[in-house]
Image (cartoon, grey):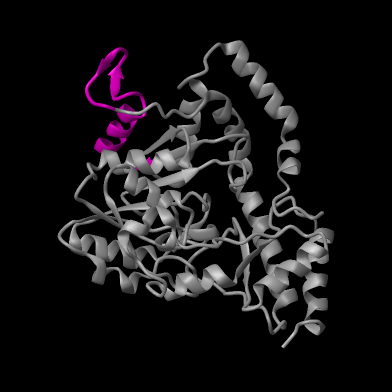
Amino acid sequence: MVELVPLVRQFQSMKQDILQAVADTIDSGKFILGPNVGRLESEISAYLGVSHAIGVANGTDALVLTLDAYGIGPGDEVITTPFTFFASAEAVSRVGAVPVFVDIDPQTYCMDPSRIEEKITSATRAIIPVHLFGQPADMNEIMHIADKHGLVVIEDACQAFGSEYRGKRVGSIGHAACFSFFPTKNLSSIGDGGLIATSDDHIAQRIRQLRQHGSQKKYFHSEIGYNSRLDELHAAILLIALPKIDEWNKERMRLATRYQEALRDISYISIEQGPQDRTHIYHLFCIRSERRDQVQDALIHGEIQCGVYYPCPLHLQDAYASLNYKLGAFPVAERMSQQLLALPMSPFLLESEQNQVIDILIRLKGEMTP
């Protein structure tokens, strides 16, 4: 079986360093908000070019804490995309605000900026663009709209660590940004982890307080907070992986180019080429086909793992039935939910394995039913 994401290989490549880091952490006796977390925060803030990086328990908490830190809550609206993982909207609901969706750009699968202003009301407080699959959203246009209307921009960069937009790291463009270190992410650990990046000193201070039960001084609490701290062990592992991330992302991009070149003449497949002003680091590599189910069946029969991202857009989820969105509300997102299929992608994917995927897709040309 060719795996969608060969995680074992990735962590095996660092196994001895990880085991040593675990032993060192155990020997230190410092397990919560210790030196590993502090060092990781410092190194990531330097990498991104921001003033603050704050480690938290996971990417979803990163979104929740950031929204809370900006005072967003009941009665507020937050504009985001319906075509993303559930957490992007879930975090908005968790603080009591209402997610307001806008359709996506069919080329990038990210939020379409041309559709944002029509959704802005007196209750709108923030915009959460998602850098989907490792492709940056159109941040210049989004920031222009946000500045015009006095809105906060929180980048959901959970799938895009190391990507760039017009020479700037994603995570350094909005007012704040959120990252996930879930095991399948480009920069990842062997469990949950997350981080918030910002250059706003006040917001950084609030997030640091919120992640620690609303406390700056032990046993003294100035507000109701959360228990959301990045573990020392995960920070130790991320410190091993961080120096490798640019090399890993380049390998993803190289493999993506191999896919694009090999599959460009297959009529039943479309591969969107992103704008030249941004770096796509391929957290996922997706093809688009009106015959997705047939393509997926052929790959599975050939022992190739593949994945549908995402089979149900957020506005049609049962959890958001109360928002009264109907089928047809966001036609581009709905169409992509029926057509996109992720192929195996990882810096540890072997060319021989990728060739197996390509060979099946090429052979399928002659087998496609009308």
* Range of residues picked out in magenta: 197-224
Name the one closer to the observer, 111 or 15: 111
Report the residue that reaches farthest toward the bottom: 370
Name the one closer to the observer, 315 or 260: 315
Task: Please provide percent x and percent y for residue 82.
Answer: 41, 62
Q: Quadrant of the image for the N terminus?
A: bottom right
Q: Quadrant of the image for the C terminus?
A: bottom right
User: Which residue is depicted at the point 44% across and 48% down?
Assistant: 87
Q: How many marks?
A: 0
Vertical comparison of 83 with 65: above or below: below
Vertical comparison of 8 with 279: above or below: above
User: Which residue is depicted at the point 67% across and 65% down?
Assistant: 256
Q: Quadrant of residue 138?
A: bottom left
Image-based side of 181 in relation to 141, left or right: right
Report the residue that reaches farthest toward the left: 122
Task: Please provide percent x and percent y for residue 20.
Answer: 69, 22
Is residue 13 in view? yes
User: Which residue is depicted at the point 70% across and 44% down?
Assistant: 7
Task: Please provide percent x and percent y for residue 23.
Answer: 67, 17
Image-based side of 85 in relation to 177, left or right: right
Q: Quadrant of residue 66?
A: top left
Task: Please provide percent x and percent y for residue 317.
Answer: 44, 58
Name the one closer to the observer, 124 or 52: 124
User: Which residue is depicted at the point 57% across and 30% down?
Assistant: 234
Magenta segment includes 289 = no
Is residue 196 in view? no
